[in-house]
């Protein structure tokens, strides 16, 4: 009887292990908290926001007033453009918001050409300081 019981126990163990090996990937698979598609979408959104910020700052710096401001502080457009590109996303977003506000105020006549140049000089100095500190 003991041999029969032992064989039955071996058979059950083999059956259980076979089932466990066969179905274990499906039984123990976990769903990711964030899907790869959502991650890709988030990365694209961050990248698009960064590109918009860079374009906004570039628009201000490449304007006639921007060029005058750069000449006033004796800094080349390429230097500032390279410095702006090295800013982190938060600094870049803040700077882009200020650039947009300055352009809107200038277009609406709320600030003069001279005031815009002073603002641009401040922006250039801030960018250069941030980059120098890093």
Image (cartoon, grey):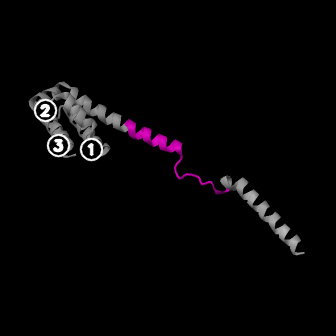
> Residue 43 occupies which quadrant of the picture?
top left
Q: Earlier in the sequence, mark 3 or mark 2?
A: 2
Secondary structure of the residue carrying tag 3 is helix
Q: Which residue is mark 3?
A: 129
Q: Nearer the viewer, residue 9 or 33?
A: 9
Left or right: 18 as drawn, with respect to 44:
right
Whole-Å distance between the Cαs marked 1 and 2? 21 Å
Q: Which residue is mark 1?
A: 91
- Residue 42 in the image: above or below residue 15: above
Q: Residues within 10 Å of mark 1 (few under 14, many from 20)?
A: some
Q: Position of residue 129 (x, y in %)?
A: 17, 43
Q: Which residue is mark 2?
A: 117
Whole-Å distance between the Cαs marked 1 and 3? 12 Å
Identify the residue at the far bottom of this view. Answer: 1
Q: Which residues are magenta?
A: 27-48
**The stretch drawn in magenta includes residue 35:** yes
Q: Position of residue 53 (x, y in %)?
A: 31, 36
């Amino acid at each position: 009887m003991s041999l029969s019981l032992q064989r039955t126990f071996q058979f059950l163990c083999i059956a259980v292990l076979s089932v466990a090996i066969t179905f274990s990937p499906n039984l123990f698979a976990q769903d990711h908290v964030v899907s790869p598609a959502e991650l890709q979408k988030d990365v694209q959104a961050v990248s698009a926001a960064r590109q918009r910020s860079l374009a906004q700052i570039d628009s201000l710096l490449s304007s006639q007033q921007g060029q005058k401001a750069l000449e006033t502080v004796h800094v080349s457009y390429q230097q500032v453009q390279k410095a702006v590109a090295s800013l982190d996303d938060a600094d870049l977003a803040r700077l882009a918001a200020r650039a947009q506000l300055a352009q809107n105020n200038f277009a609406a006549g709320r600030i003069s050409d001279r005031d815009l140049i002073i603002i641009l000089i401040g922006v250039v100095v801030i960018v250069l300081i941030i980059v120098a500190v890093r």
